[in-house]
Image (tube, grey):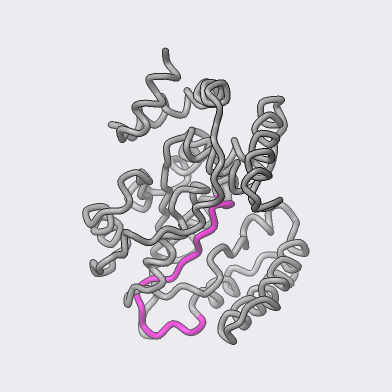
Amino acid sequence: MTHAATVMFNIGATKAGTTWLYRYLSAHPDCYLRSVKELHYFDALDRDDCDWQIERFSKMRDAEKSAGGSADCQALMDLLGREGEDTDGYLAYLNDGREGQNLVGDATPGYALLSGERFAKMAAIAPDVRFIYILRDPVSRFWSHVRMRAGRRDLAAASVQKWSNRIFWRVARGQKFQGILERGDYRAVLEKLRQAVDPSRLLVLFYEDLFNNKTVARICEFLGISMCRADFSARYNDGPKANMSANQLALAQGWLADQYDYVRTHFGPLPDAWQANMVRAKA
């Protein structure tokens, strides 16, 4: 390695195009990203669940067909198994195998729930650290997250609808089910980021504007890499289909009304998809 690479943290939001962006950057000649997308290093440390993550990566390693993917999983397990926090080891993991590319990174939407203090530490991990956070229409993101969780239980169409409804009503009863609402709390995440990260090192995007050359050029400029063609037809992790009832939609719009107001105030104007749900939420 002839120079220090920029470190990128893509911290979400969940169900807002992080996998698409990871795939784009993984194929980019100026970038070097490990085959494991979500490293979960810092949230595992802060929540004291390294053992759980090691077990999860062990299953990924055993299921991984490529030798490189298996090796990446094993190296990450070794890192998580060390005593205490090992920042140098983490950076070594990101850079192991890099051949002069300008950027390394970690795309873990779960990091959005980290503290402001942790964000500040992450921002200081290397000379050049940059954060990307993608916002998706709050209602659409919420329901996509619900469907994803439902699909993990049963992929049969009728069961997905049933489980989506069950999960929705658990959230309605105030249960913090799998962090579904918390993962879409843009106000909380962005306030922490704005206090912990230099504004010039933070890029906030709209999912609805992500899939075009203008936004990709903006991302590349922000990361200090060349502009490369993107495949806008590719979609990942769309999840199974299920429909919200009119009652569910109205409730979700009410729960999330403050998210629309916050983003409009600090990062507006909002995309059209946001405007429609925001108007209904305010009616």
Against 253, residue 93 (above or below) is below
Q: Nearer the viewer, residue 98 or 155?
A: 155
Quadrant housing the N terminus: bottom left
Left/right placement of residue 232 relative to residue 80 reads left
Residue most extreme to the top? 283
The image quadrant of residue 28 is: bottom left
Q: Is residue 9 visible?
A: no
Identify the residue at horizontal 23%, vertical 66% (top origin): 227
Identify the residue at horizontal 56%, vertical 70% (top origin): 36
Q: Nearer the viewer, residue 17 or 164?
A: 164
In the rendered image, residue 167, in percent from the top left (x then y), is placed at: 68, 36
In the rendered image, residue 263, in percent from the top left (x then y), is placed at: 39, 32
The image quadrant of residue 75 is: bottom right
Q: Range of the magenta residues? A: 96-111
Against 164, residue 10 (above or below) is below
In the rendered image, residue 280, in percent from the top left (x then y), is placed at: 42, 19
In the rendered image, residue 243 lying in the magenta stretch gets the answer no
